[in-house]
Image (cartoon, rainbow, N blue to C red):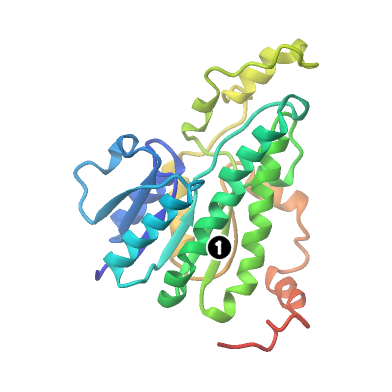
Amino acid sequence: MASKTVLITGCSDNGIGSALGKVLHARGYHIFATARNLAKMTWLEGLDNVTPIVLDITKPADIKTAVETVTKATDGKLDHLINNAARNHFMPVLDVPVDAVRNLFESNYFGPLSVTQAFAPLLIKAKGQVSFITSISGYVNTPWMGLYASSKRAIEVVADTLRLELAPLGVKVLTVVTGGVKSAGQTYFDDLKLPGGSLYKDVEEIIISRAKGADGMPRMDAAEYSKAVVDEIEKGISGKFWYGEFAEMVRQGTTAVAVPLEAMDSQMIQGTGLDTWKL
């Protein structure tokens, strides 16, 4: 397979995954486009140089099959992995059963972790790059989004650690901290309602309205966002890229911007073995 290869999780229509896929396809990449339901990837119709794959990132059997499909097509190499698939969630913390929280983390934390571990040998062989689509919500304590935000922040810590651990193996890691972007995410909440005994019934209509995007906040067009993200991916470097509405404001307000990321990484690996080990 002569083209550069990329596997993107969560490529259903009208989402960030499909928007990224369109940009990458236009730039000549072979796209392994994944979704739980292939019928929801109609944007692939008529395109060549694409391989649709059924992939529920919470199912080990699906992940295994996806790895086998890519391995067979590429002689065991993958240039880029983009961990995009995730579930949105909007609900007061007190109103969510712990089992439901565990399910959320299966999608937003354990899923991308499992996919990354499974595709690591292919990325290492290609000296490739893995990207994680995270969220500015992981840096701010927005009411009703605490559980979603915590799941996105958790996988971001994994991504930031992998940036250090994969460096000696020649794999780049890019964390894309995403601000407001127009996508199909709000459709998760068409039938949202609070449980009967909720302490927040008095503000239920406000919660539902905000969940559906009626919060007055601007959102960037997904095509504009995706072009900028792909530009960053094609630099072939590790790091953290903040993009989308409010991303720069949150970055400046919540991170130690006086300390360059490279300097922080250099300090963090001291004495861990990664400061001296080279493959």
Residue located 65% across and 50% down the image: 248
In the rendered image, residue 19, in percent from the top left (x then y), is placed at: 39, 45
In the figure, is residue 274 to the left or right of 110? right
Q: Quadrant of the C terminus?
A: bottom right
Q: Callout 1 environment at 10 Å: few (<14), some (14 to 19), or many (20+)?
A: many
Q: Is residue 162 above or below residue 50?
A: below
Where disc 1 sits, the SS reads strand
Residue located 36% across and 37% down the image: 37
The single residue placed furthest to the front in the displayed view is: 61
Residue located 46% across and 39% down the image: 221
Residue for badge 1: 174
In the figure, is residue 179 to the left or right of 7? right
Q: Is residue 268 above or below residue 244?
A: below
In the figure, is residue 43 to the left or right of 232? left
In the rendered image, residue 232, in percent from the top left (x then y), is placed at: 49, 61
Residue placed most toward the observer, 253 or 90:
90
Total number of numbered discs in the rendering: 1
Q: Residue 25 lies in what quarter of the image?
A: bottom left
In the rendered image, residue 249, in percent from the top left (x then y), is placed at: 69, 46
Residue placed most toward the observer, 60 or 157:
60
In the figure, is residue 199 to the left or right of 110? right
Q: Amino acid at mark 1?
A: Leu
Q: Quadrant of the N terminus?
A: bottom left
Residue placed most toward the observer, 218 or 31:
31
Q: Residue 202 lies in what quarter of the image?
A: top right
In the rendered image, residue 70, in percent from the top left (x then y), is placed at: 33, 62
Q: Is residue 100 above or below residue 138?
A: above
